[in-house]
Image (spheres, grey):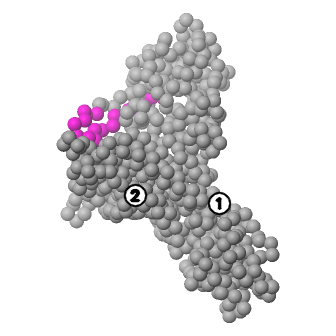
Amino acid sequence: MTRLSQLLLPTERQPPADAEAVSHQLMVRAGLVRQMGAGLWSWLPAGWRVHQKVVAIVREEMERIGAQEVLMPVLQPAELWKRTGRYDAIQGELFRLKDRKDADMVLAMTHEEAMTSHVAQIVRSYRDLPFSLFQFQVKERDEPRPRAGVLRTREFVMKDAYTFDRDEAGLQEHYERYREAYARVYDRSGLRWYEVESDTGMMGGKRAHEYMAPCAAGEDDVVLAGPDGASYSANVEVASADAQPIALPPAGETPVTIETPGTTTIAALAEHLDRPAGSLLKAFPVVVTPAPATVKGEVPAAKPRLVLVLLRGDHEVVEIKLEKALGGTVRQASEQEIRDRIGPPGFLGPIGSDVPVLLDAAAEATTEANDGGGWVVGANVVDQHLDGVVPGRDFAYEIADVRAVVAGDTVDGQPVTIEPAIEVGNIFQLMTRYSEPLGATFLDEEGKEQPIVMGSYGIGPARIAAAAVEQFHDEQGISWPKAIAPFDIEVVALGKQGTDEQLAAAKVYDELTAAGFDVLLDDRNGGAGQKLTDAELLGCPLRITVGKRSLAEGRVEAQIRRGQETIEGGLALDGLADAVRELWERIP
C-alpha cells in the first residue's frame, strides 16, 4: 500500500528563488525533484515514478519496432572520440578526465562512438545486417548555463538508439519506423508536439528531425505554417520561408555616394534616409575556420578566411545556417581585421574590397522582385554610403539562405508563426559519419568492404515529464496526463487515523488497486485544506475524497484534476470500481 504518511514527498509552499520555468517551480514544490548542485538533480520517489512511466512507454515502442536493449559505459576512452574528431570539435560541454594511468577519458554525452566501436568488432558480413540497438543510460554534459530545473542539466538519462544498415535505403526504412515510434511515444505520453526539420549539429550526417513540445519555457523556436504546422514545421535554426516583400527605389546606371554622418547602425541609417530597414543591406563580416578532417583520407582543411555576409537590414543571421553555408565554424571579425581588409566599421560594403561576399537568399529574392531597384550599402568610407547598388551588376557574390525566418514570412503562400518549444527528442541520419573513422564495415554480396550506414535516435524522459508540467498546469499545481502521472488516483481520507473515514478510504484504496489502478492513499492526520492543496499540487488525474458527510450517504467525492471538474453527486461506494473505470475513460 502506498500511503502518503510513509511516502517521501516534501511539498513546498514557495518555489525556489531562482526558478523561472513553471516546471522547475512545480516539480520542486510537489516534491518530485531536488537540486544537488548547478545542473545536478535528484529524482525523489514520486518524481521517479513519472520518469519511469515515460521510460516504460519508450521501451515498449522501441521493442515494438524490433530494437534490442543494451547498456554501455558512461566512462569511455577518449581515443574513440579522437578518432571521430569530436574530442577536439566539442569544446567545453564534453567532460574530460584522466585515469590513474594518465590515460585520457571522457564522460559520454552520447554513445555513437561506443556503439559503433562494438559493432565494428562484431559485424563481418552483409548477413549480419540490419539491426537496431537502444539503451537507457546516464549522459554527462557540462552545460554552460544549466537552468529550468530538469530541462537543462549536466547529468540526465537518455534513451539513445542506433540503427545499422547495409545501405541508405535500409537506413530510410529504419528512420521511418523510428518516426512512427516517436509519434506513438509522444501521443501516449499525452503531449502536444511537433516533428520539425532540424540541423544535424555536432552529430553530423545527412538529415535530422527534432520533436518539440510547445510551451512558454521552450529554449527553441519552431516555425509553423498551416494548422498545427501541418504544411510546414522546422526549427528556426534551419527554417526557410519567403520573406515579406519590400520595395526598393529605382537604381541609376551607377551607385551614388550619399553623406550619412554618424549612421553606424541600420536603425540610425534608416531614420536618416527615411527608408525602411529592409531596403538597406546589412554587412556582417565573419572569419570562417573550415571544419577539420575527421575521416582518414580527407584533404586537410584550408586556412581561416574573411567573408562579408550581406542581408536585408530587417533580418538577422542564424549562425548554424551560416556555418553550414560556409563549411566551417564562424566568428565575428575583429575590428582590426575589418579595417585591414574592408573599411571602417559601421560603413562597410561590398564595393571596392577583395573580400568575398555571401548574399542572403532573401536579399537576392528582393532584388529580383524589384527589377531595376537598388540597395543602400556602406561605402567603406567614414560617414558615407552608396545608394542604388545592384547585386551582380556592382559586385559579385555567392548566395545562401543564412537568415532567421520571422513571423509573417510565408511558405507556399501561407504565413508562418513562431512558437517557443522544448526539444523532447531527435533523430539523425548519420550515414557513415562514425562507421568510417571507427572502421565499422562489412563485406557485401560481392565480397567488397563497405561502411555500415547508421542512424541515431534520442529521447529525454526527463524532458517529456517537464514538458507535460509546462503544458498542463494551473494556479493550483500540476495536471498530469494519465499515462505518466505518478499515481492514477489519489484517495484522500479527511478524518484522522482510526476514524470511519480513514477505514473507508483504506477499503476504497484496496478496491481500486485490485481493479488495476495505481493508487496513492493520503492517510495523514493533517487538515482537509492541507490534504486537498497537496493533492492539487501533485496533480494525479483523479482524486477520490472520503469525508464524513459523503460517507454517511454511501458515496465519495470525485474530481478530475484536469480542469478541476467535480463530479456532481460524487460516486456511490457500491460498484465504485466500475464507476471509476467509466470515469477514467473521460480523462486525457
Query: Which stretch is magenta?
Result: 283-301
252 to 130, vertically: above or below = above
- Res 430 quadrant in image: top left
Residue 527 seen in this snapshot: no
Residue at the extreme top of the image, as rendered: 253
Calculate the distance from the C-alpha at mark 1 to the C-alpha at mark 2. Answer: 32 Å
Image quadrant containing the N terminus:
bottom right
Q: Earlier in the sequence, mark 1 or mark 2?
A: 2
The foreground one among 576 and 397 is 576
Q: Which mark is residue 256?
A: none
Label 1: few (<14), some (14–19) or many (≥20) C-alpha neighbours in 10 Å: many
59 to 443, vertically: above or below = below
366 to 170, vertically: above or below = above
User: What amino acid type should be assigned to the residue bearing mark 2?
Assistant: Gly
Task: Please name the residue that numbered disc 2 is placed on.
Answer: 66
User: What amino acid type should be assigned to the residue bearing mark 1?
Assistant: Phe
Task: Please name the residue that numbered disc 1 is placed on.
Answer: 472
Left or right: residue 445 versus residue 271 is left
Q: How many marks?
A: 2
Q: Position of residue 557 (x, y in %)?
A: 75, 77
Q: Position of residue 353 (x, y in %)?
A: 42, 18
Residue at 34% over, 64% down: 71
Residue at 71% over, 92% down: 499
Label 2: few (<14), some (14–19) or many (≥20) C-alpha neighbours in 10 Å: few
Residue at 65% over, 34% down: 415
Left or right: residue 437 versus residue 534 is left
Circle 1 — which element? loop
Q: Position of residue 404 (x, y in %)?
A: 54, 35
Task: Check if residue 291 falls in the magenta segment.
Answer: yes
